[in-house]
């Protein structure tokens, strides 16, 4: 079965490890991939697609070596294959202009300021991944335990399975 | 694979053609029937697609517009009548049920009613399970089993997750919902598609029964099975927890449109159960709320678009198949293949119940009813076994709904299984016991009571 992937893009190894630890609450059917730079991230995204998995969420820092996190998020919005991917900016250093650009051009789903609250990160991710499952043709029942169960069940009942 | 087998059957049967007492029309119907059996069992194409395939095949093969001419002595059904099965009165009754249920969900009526009804059951886990089962069963008598399960499971999941690790109460809580929804679906003609399929078949063969009579016969069965399931669940999964709090529902919606819905809902149900008094068929009564709710904007065109039309088609195809089997005399031909002389009524009822139970455990309940009802009720009508057609129909409908031993048996089971709180083993043990109770009740215990009360 194809997996739902969260991609964490962060250049500082300690910070990246902490984000990945926070997101480790998601288990069955959900995987966390890591990237250091935007180039890395693009390679990881290509790999997800090649493996038949579905990229659901990108959690990106803004200031990265080379292109910025906002650049990556904007490029996601320009790719028809990746428009469904939910975007979280997790940063302490994005300026006013960068933030405005992230909201307007990358249709940012959520902004988390460093230092972040682990529970908030998990709650936001759970809600956004639930949206992804509902927008895709993934089986909602497969994610009842990991994501927003009641919302997924609601969607399942709307699909009108035959008694 | 399923498609290949279906096509092969279709082609081979048509190539062989009429044989002995298998007439031309009956042999064509045999090709259609066999293909439908394969397609409904394998689900190689969507269930509703098989249904409309049946309708199309009957139109071009056995109707008055058949492409290859039929024998002159065969009274071919008009093709308009075959199309018209998609607007059969039973489907219109079901449509009424769909619209009411969908509007009730839209205005939160189901959840709020559940909240009000759950309050008297207190906070002890055993009585909470009882309360959940009663409410779920009541809702699923009018709302689809799957939608009821999803709504109630959304309430139960947070509570189940909050129980201490290893507390088996969790299994009882989570299992109680699909079990009760499946059982409750038996209760009324609109409770579940197999009921509509059986009712459609009985009506087409002049054995119609009204809404109230169905309820008088089926609700007591549901109550007994529900009580047995409660005892089973609360014995098997004992708990150390002594106190449970469930948050269900909230304030009733008091907007005018919600009030209209409450009144229309109550009046429709009242109209359905009082048919013996006023004599208006339930399909006509059920069509009134469709008109009223749409006209008042309580139910919008957008809501209408979201209804599960494919389920109506699934039922419609089943009714068409049954008509085709009867019109072409295929049922008589099949019945003649078997020597019925040694078959007692009891043995026939038992075989019918077990066949429905086993088939419906692995394939869709509705598909099972579509396949078994034409032949089962045909046998009862032909008189080779001295059993009432109505009893035959009820056995099929009830045992189809009580087949719930596997996660794939019904969508409500799939929902419970997906929660991660129940194992296949739990479903199997509880499901098999409930299935057996259902068979014993419908085959042995209930018929004498129904007869004594003059219902059969």
Image: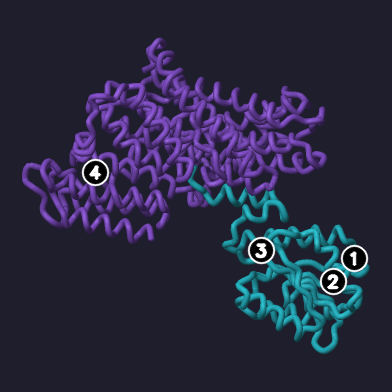
Classify residue B356 by image quadrant: top left
Q: Secondary structure at mark 1?
A: loop
Instruction: Report how far apart the C-alphas of labels 3 and 1 lie in the structure.
Output: 23 Å
CB atoms of marks 1 and 2 within 8 Å: yes
Determine if marks 4 and 1 fall on one subunit. Answer: no
- Residue at image point 73% right, 76% down: A106
For mark 2, what is the residue? A90
Q: CA distance from mark 4 to mark 3?
A: 45 Å
Element at badge 4?
Answer: helix
Chain of the residue under the numbered disc 4 shown in the image: B
Mark 4: few/some/many CA within 10 Å (<14, 14-19, 20+): some
* Distance between the alpha carbons at the discs numbered 1 and 2: 8 Å
Q: Quadrant of residue B405?
A: top right
> Could you tell me which residue is drawn at 43 percent across and 13 percent down?
B449
Is residue B42 shown above or below B208? Answer: below
Question: Chain letter for cyan?
Answer: A
* Residue at 47% in and 23% down: B440
Q: Residue at x 35, y 44 (%)?
A: B316
Pointer 4 and pointer 1: residues touching (CB < 8 Å)?
A: no
Chain letter of mark 2 equals A
Q: What number of labels is visible?
A: 4
Tell us which disc is closer to us: 4 or 3: 3
Left/right of residue A114 with respect to residue B402 in the rendered view: right
Which residue matches tag 3? A132
In the image: residue B29, left or right of residue A14: left
Give whichever of A76, B356 is nearer the camera.
Answer: B356
Residue at mark 4: B81
In the image: residue B370, left or right of residue B108: left
Whether marks 1 and 2 lie on the same chain:
yes
Residue B455 appears at what percent x and percent y? 39, 16
Q: Which chain is purple?
A: B
């Amino acid at each position: 079965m194809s997996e739902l992937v969260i991609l964490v893009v962060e250049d500082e190894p300690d910070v990246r490890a902490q984000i990945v630890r926070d997101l480790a609450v998601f288990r069955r059917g959900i995987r966390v991939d890591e990237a250091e730079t935007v180039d890395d991230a693009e390679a990881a995204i290509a790999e997800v697609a090649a493996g038949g998995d579905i990229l659901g969420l990108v959690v990106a820092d803004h200031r990265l070596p080379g292109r910025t996190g906002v650049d990556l998020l904007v490029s996601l919005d320009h790719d028809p294959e990746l428009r469904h991917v939910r975007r979280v900016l997790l940063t302490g250093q994005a300026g006013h202009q960068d933030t405005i650009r992230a909201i307007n051009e990358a249709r940012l789903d959520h902004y988390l300021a460093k230092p972040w609250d682990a529970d908030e990160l998990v709650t936001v991710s759970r809600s956004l991944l639930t949206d992804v499952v509902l927008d895709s043709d993934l089986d909602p029942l497969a994610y009842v335990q990991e994501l927003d169960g009641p919302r997924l069940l609601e969607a399942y009942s709307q699909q009108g399975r035959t008694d | 694979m399923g498609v290949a087998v279906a096509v092969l059957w279709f082609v081979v049967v048509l190539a062989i053609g009429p044989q002995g007492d298998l007439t031309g029309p009956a042999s064509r119907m045999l090709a259609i029937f066999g293909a439908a059996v394969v397609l409904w069992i394998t689900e190689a194409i969507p269930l509703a697609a098989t249904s409309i395939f049946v309708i199309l095949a009957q139109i071009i093969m056995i109707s008055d517009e058949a492409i290859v001419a039929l024998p002159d002595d065969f009274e071919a059904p008009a093709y308009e009548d075959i199309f018209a099965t998609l607007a059969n009165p039973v489907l219109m009754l079901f449509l009424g049920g769909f619209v009411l249920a969908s509007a009730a969900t839209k205005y939160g009526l189901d959840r709020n009613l559940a909240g009000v009804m759950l309050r008297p059951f207190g906070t002890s886990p055993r009585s909470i399970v009882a309360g959940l089962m009663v409410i779920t069963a009541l809702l699923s008598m009018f709302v689809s089993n799957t939608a009821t399960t999803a709504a109630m499971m959304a309430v139960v999941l947070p509570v189940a997750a909050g129980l201490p690790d290893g507390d088996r109460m969790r299994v009882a809580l989570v299992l109680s919902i699909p079990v009760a929804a499946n059982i409750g679906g038996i209760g009324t003609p609109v409770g579940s598609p197999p009921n509509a399929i059986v009712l459609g078949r009985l009506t087409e063969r002049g054995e119609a029964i009204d809404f109230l009579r169905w309820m008088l016969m089926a609700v007591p069965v549901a109550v007994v099975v529900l009580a047995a399931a409660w005892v089973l669940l609360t014995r098997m999964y004992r708990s150390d927890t002594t106190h449970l709090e469930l948050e269900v529902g909230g304030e009733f919606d008091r907007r005018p449109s919600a009030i209209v819905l409450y009144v229309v809902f109550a009046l429709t149900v009242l109209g359905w159960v009082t048919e013996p008094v006023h004599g208006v068929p339930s399909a006509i009564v059920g069509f009134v709320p469709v008109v009223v709710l749409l006209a008042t904007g309580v139910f919008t065109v957008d809501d209408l678009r979201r209804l599960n039309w494919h389920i109506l088609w699934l039922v419609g195809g089943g009714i068409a198949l049954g008509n085709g089997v009867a019109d072409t005399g295929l049922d008589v031909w099949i019945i003649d293949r078997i020597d019925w002389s040694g078959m007692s009524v009891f043995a026939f009822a038992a075989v019918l119940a077990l066949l429905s139970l086993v088939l419906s455990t692995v394939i869709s309940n509705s598909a099972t009813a579509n396949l078994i009802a034409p032949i089962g009720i045909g046998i009862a009508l032909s008189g080779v076994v001295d059993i009432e057609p109505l009893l035959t129909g009820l056995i099929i409908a009830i045992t189809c709904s009580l087949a719930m031993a596997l996660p794939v048996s019904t969508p409500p089971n799939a929902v419970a299984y997906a929660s991660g709180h129940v194992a296949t083993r739990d479903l199997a043990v509880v499901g098999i016991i409930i299935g057996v109770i259902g068979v014993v009740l419908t085959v042995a215990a209930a018929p004498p009571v129904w007869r004594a009360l003059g219902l059969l």
